[in-house]
Amino acid sequence: MLKWLLAVRLTRLLAGILVLNALHVAFDGLEEKALSR
């Protein structure tokens, strides 16, 4: 049971990192477009 809980937490953590990474990349892309105008 404890291992399952730990696995869920690790999965959520990884998912959160991936989402933050994706947002960061998206914002960087928007900034580049805004600066290139």
Image: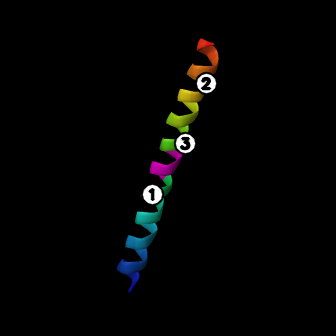
Q: Of callouts 3 and 1, which one flags the residue occurring earlier in the amino acid sequence? A: 1
Q: Of callouts 1 and 2, which one flags the residue occurring earlier in the amino acid sequence? A: 1
Residue under label 2, please give it.
31
The segment highlighted magenta reads 17-21
For label 1, the crowd category at 10 Å Cα-Cα, with few meaning under 14, some 14 to 19 and many 20 or more, is few
Residue under label 1, please give it.
15
Q: Real-space Cα distance between discs 3 and 2?
A: 12 Å
Q: Quadrant of the C terminus?
A: top right
Is residue 26 highlighted in magenta? Answer: no
Q: Residue at (45%, 49%) from the top-left corner?
A: 18
Q: Of callouts 3 and 2, which one flags the residue occurring earlier in the amino acid sequence? A: 3
Q: Residue at (45%, 57%) from the top-left corner?
A: 15
The amino acid beneath tag 1 is Ala
Q: Residue at (41%, 64%) from the top-left corner?
A: 11
Asked whether the residues under the numbered discs 3 and 1 touch, taking CB atoms below 8 Å apart as contact, a structural biologist would say no
Secondary structure category for the residue under label 3: helix
Magenta highlight: main SS? helix
Residue under label 3, please give it.
23
Q: Nearer the viewer, mark 1 or mark 2?
A: 2
For label 2, the crowd category at 10 Å Cα-Cα, with few meaning under 14, some 14 to 19 and many 20 or more, is few
Q: Hey, which residue is sitting farthest front in the picture?
A: 37
Which residue is nearer to you in this view: 12 or 34? 34
Asked whether the residues under the numbered discs 3 and 2 touch, taking CB atoms below 8 Å apart as contact, a structural biologist would say no
Q: Real-space Cα distance between discs 1 and 2?
A: 24 Å
Is residue 19 highlighted in magenta? Answer: yes
The amino acid beneath tag 3 is Leu
